[in-house]
Image (cartoon, rainbow, N blue to C red):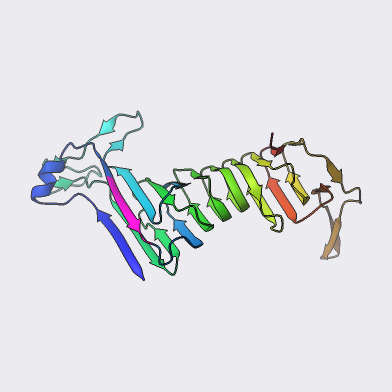
């Protein structure tokens, strides 16, 4: 197993003096060779803060460009430089007893591991957002990407199986061939397919945002749709399931609770694998490619 690690940070001592008042970004690149170039591969990327961008290119390695800034911004957006404070004070009101206060720079800490065409990329840093721009070969791919704060996930021109999760940012997938399972808790999910796997079930969900997916005209699917506080739109002809709503009954302490399920069921082009879309505060758009 090949392991490549970046740990780039401001250093103390003589290097600290060269970094005072610096406002440059930290940038590093990892080049990860595949064990079997040209064959299908799996890429698993998980970070805490930041954005993930994946694009294809005409090469055989996986190239990861990582970037973060060494500057901080206050609430007004003004840059705040790294500095050393030698005054006998501290921000929490406690005496520093003549000690120097050091405002550390942002750290860039990325690890990539590869074994048998499986690449795992992760970062444990919570201190500052990072941006990962990942170039992948044009082979069939299995992508599993996730981030939590301060960034979107974007994927362009990839063919294969995609599993995408973003907690506080959007998911934007363009010119995808294959299948997708995507969720964005507090933003939108926007997907454009070039072609789809006709046998694969797919799911798209968000709590606070729109779901907007464009499919080829040949789409065949059994749809399961729900928007609690939004509308649903499509330019496909959907054969709606006219069956009565499903009713769930339960009893507790002698009382009965009745819950009527408000999902919309239907078929596109006589039906196929399940296509599930669910949002609470947003609209659903099922578009037909022009």
Question: Secondary structure of the magenta portion, mostly?
Answer: strand
What residue is drawn where x is 15% and y is 40%?
A: 20
Q: Quadrant of the N terminus?
A: bottom left
Q: Is 255 positioned to the left or the right of 26 in the image?
A: right
Q: Nearer the viewer, residue 267 or 86?
A: 267
Residue 33 image point, x, y percent? 36, 61
The number of numbered discs placed on residues in the rendered structure image is: 0
What residue is drawn where x is 13% and y is 51%?
A: 12
What residue is drawn where x is 54% and y is 57%?
A: 140
Residue 108 image point, x, y percent? 30, 51
Looking at the rendering, the stretch of residues picked out in magenta corresponds to: 27-33
Q: Is 185 positioned to the left or the right of 230 in the image?
A: left
Q: Nearer the viewer, residue 275 or 269?
A: 269
Inspect the magenta stretch and tell me whether residue 29 lies in it: yes
Q: Nearer the viewer, residue 151 or 64?
A: 64
Q: Is 63 positioned to the left or the right of 235 in the image?
A: left
Residue 114 is at least partly visible in this image: yes
Residue 197 image point, x, y percent? 67, 55
Inspect the magenta stretch and tell me whether residue 104 lies in it: no
Residue 91 image point, x, y percent? 24, 42
Name the image quarter holding residue 22. top left
What residue is drawn where x is 21% and y is 45%?
A: 103
Q: Quadrant of the C terminus?
A: top right
Residue 207 is at least partly visible in this image: no
């Amino acid at each position: 197993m090949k392991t490549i690690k970046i740990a780039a940070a401001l250093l103390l001592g003589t290097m600290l003096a060269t970094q005072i008042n610096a406002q440059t970004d930290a940038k590093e690149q990892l080049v990860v060779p595949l064990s079997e170039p040209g064959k299908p591969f799996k890429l698993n990327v998980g970070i805490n803060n930041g954005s993930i961008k994946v694009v294809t290119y005409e090469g055989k390695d996986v190239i990861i460009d990582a970037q973060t800034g060494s500057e901080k911004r206050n609430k007004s957006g003004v840059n705040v430089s790294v500095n050393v404070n030698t005054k006998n004070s501290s921000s929490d009101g406690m005496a520093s007893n003549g000690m120097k206060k050091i405002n550390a720079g942002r750290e860039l800490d990325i690890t990539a591991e590869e074994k048998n065409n499986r690449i795992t990329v992760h970062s444990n840093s919570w201190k500052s957002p990072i941006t990962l721009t990942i170039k992948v070969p044009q082979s069939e791919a299995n992508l599993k990407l996730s981030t939590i704060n301060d960034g979107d996930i974007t994927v362009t021109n990839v063919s294969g199986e995609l599993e995408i999760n973003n907690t506080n940012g959007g998911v934007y997938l363009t010119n995808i061939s294959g299948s997708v399972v995507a969720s964005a808790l507090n933003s939108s999910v926007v997907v454009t397919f070039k072609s789809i796997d006709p046998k694969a079930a797919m799911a798209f969900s968000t709590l606070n945002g729109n779901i907007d997916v464009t499919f080829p005209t040949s789409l065949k699917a059994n749809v399961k749709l729900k928007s609690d506080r939004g509308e649903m739109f499509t330019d496909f002809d959907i054969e709606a399931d006219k069956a009565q709503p499903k009713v769930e009954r339960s009893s507790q302490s002698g009382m009965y609770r009745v819950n009527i399920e408000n999902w919309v069921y239907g078929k596109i082009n006589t039906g196929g694998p399940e296509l599930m879309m669910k949002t609470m505060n947003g609209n659903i758009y099922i578009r037909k490619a022009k």
